[in-house]
Image: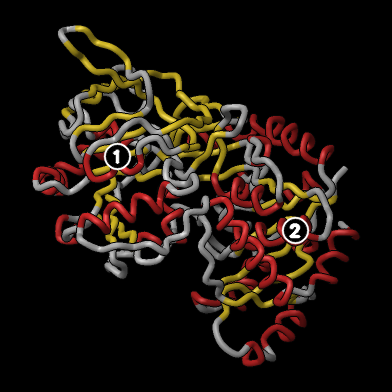
Amino acid sequence: MAKAIMIQGTMSNVGKSLVAAGLCRIFHQDGYKCAPFKAQNMALNSYVTDEGLEMGRAQVMQAEAAGVRPRAEMNPILLKPTNDTGSQVIVNGRSIGNYNARDYFSYKKELIPNVMEAYRTLAEEYDVIVIEGAGSPAEINLKDADHFVNMDMAKLAEAPVLLVGDIDRGGVFAQLYGTTALLTEEEQKRIRGYIINKFRGDVTLLSPGPEMLEEKTGIPVVGTVPMMPLKLDDEDSLTDRFGNRQVTGTVDLAVVRLPRISNFSDFSVFDMLPETSVRYVGKPSELGNPDLIILPGSKDTIGDLTWLKQSGLAGLILEKAADGTPVFGICGGFQMLGKSISDPEGAERKGTTEGLGLLPHDTVYETEKHQTKITGTLPVFEGELSDLSGMDFTGYEIHMGVSSITENGIRRQLEQPFLQKNNIYGTYVHGIFDAAGIAAATVRALAARKGFAIDDLPDGDYAAFKETQYDLLADTLRSSLDMDRIYQILEEGL
């Protein structure tokens, strides 16, 4: 069975996912077959595996760092929030329905066998499992319902724990000490080291804090990790990307920040392209005059479309489109561009609403989710993005709706996951810009529309770019952490 080590945090967004990914990369570089594992993830950024199963993108990122294929076993429970009190529950890659929080907490214990079957499957095939917790292990109001999230998972996997604190928010020693103090004595013994994350400045200024913390808890600080300017997917609920509102490049991409925005990782590829700004806009005053307006995916498409109309953004988008500004919709955003969306069974939100009418399709939701990997060739596009025609793409589909168009009184389902009219483009394919050359061709076409020529953009695919980022992450952790101590913790276990 594999050796295991678990990364927990003092709160959300302390950097657990990146630390776990960095350790996956280091173990991979050192010759070990390593896999990530997160029993329960709550996220709207998801991915479809080769088997057609859905999982959180954070574990996909960690699997890529480990040099292995993403598998649903790496994230057996995925919660996709549909509103403030409920989520769609994905178990082993398949939806089992929508649950409100209280009902899910009551049901959650029944999922322990699913979690352990997934974990054991990985443990039998890999040398090292890097487990990631969720939130904080010291949420004392929720500890009875932990079951497999933080310390209960560490116990089930017999894994030592590294506890990560975020110094950028301040009070990191109180974070680490307070979290430890709220745990039981048995749980405290599982913590074998502290990691101080997101540090800026001269690390010697921390002294004597780490030494005093070890005196009080008996647990050493095994490293201080600097703030890292990496361009990798992050947790969707607390991402810093949504703060990007300034135009800093020649080409301005405006992504509508829907209340239930999902899979905004579709636009991470533009991070590798200079002269490109990706802004997230949530009100009309923020839209400005972008070169491309993007309607992203949504986990509450009818609700988000209603919000889009009420906010005034829908009317403004229609005005921009009429003036010739290209609009690109992906998944739920693609559905919004059509004539209507109907959800007769309440798969997301029961009802029917009129779409923006920029594309000629209607969408009807069904209870069974369509999720599949897809590769192919882009169809012939007209308008500003005609240069994309015939380019090879890869991606995946995750959606409840089936879209169709009606011609001469005959309704027919779309034969391919694309639709285009004038400068309005829509697709069901997530990751549509990731394949080699597509993002660069998009940016070049938009720049040419403004009279600029950008010839030095990298045409490589996003996967190759991410490899450089994973190596940079591993290099940073190697220079910041006591890896000899971490290997010792891994070998000793508990």
Q: Secondary structure at mark 2?
A: helix
Instruction: Look at 42% across and 61% down and name the residue there.
Output: 457
Q: Report which residue position mark 2 lands on.
A: 187
Q: Is residue 148 above or below residue 356?
A: below
Q: Is residue 486 left or right of residue 250?
A: right
Of 196 and 290, the residue lying toward us: 290
As measured in the structure, the alpha-carbon distance from the residue carrying label 2 to the one carrying label 1 is 47 Å
- Asked if residue 139 shows in the view, the reply is no
Measured from the top left, where is residue 8 in percent x and y? 66, 59
Q: Residues within 10 Å of mark 2 (few under 14, many from 20)?
A: some
Q: Is residue 197 left or right of residue 279?
A: right
Of 84 and 67, the residue lying toward us: 67
Q: Report which residue position mark 1 lands on.
A: 329
Q: Is residue 257 above or below residue 367?
A: below
| Mark 2 or 1, closer to the camera | 1
Instruction: Look at 45% across and 43% down and name the residue there.
Output: 44
Residue kind at label 1, given as amino acid type: Gly
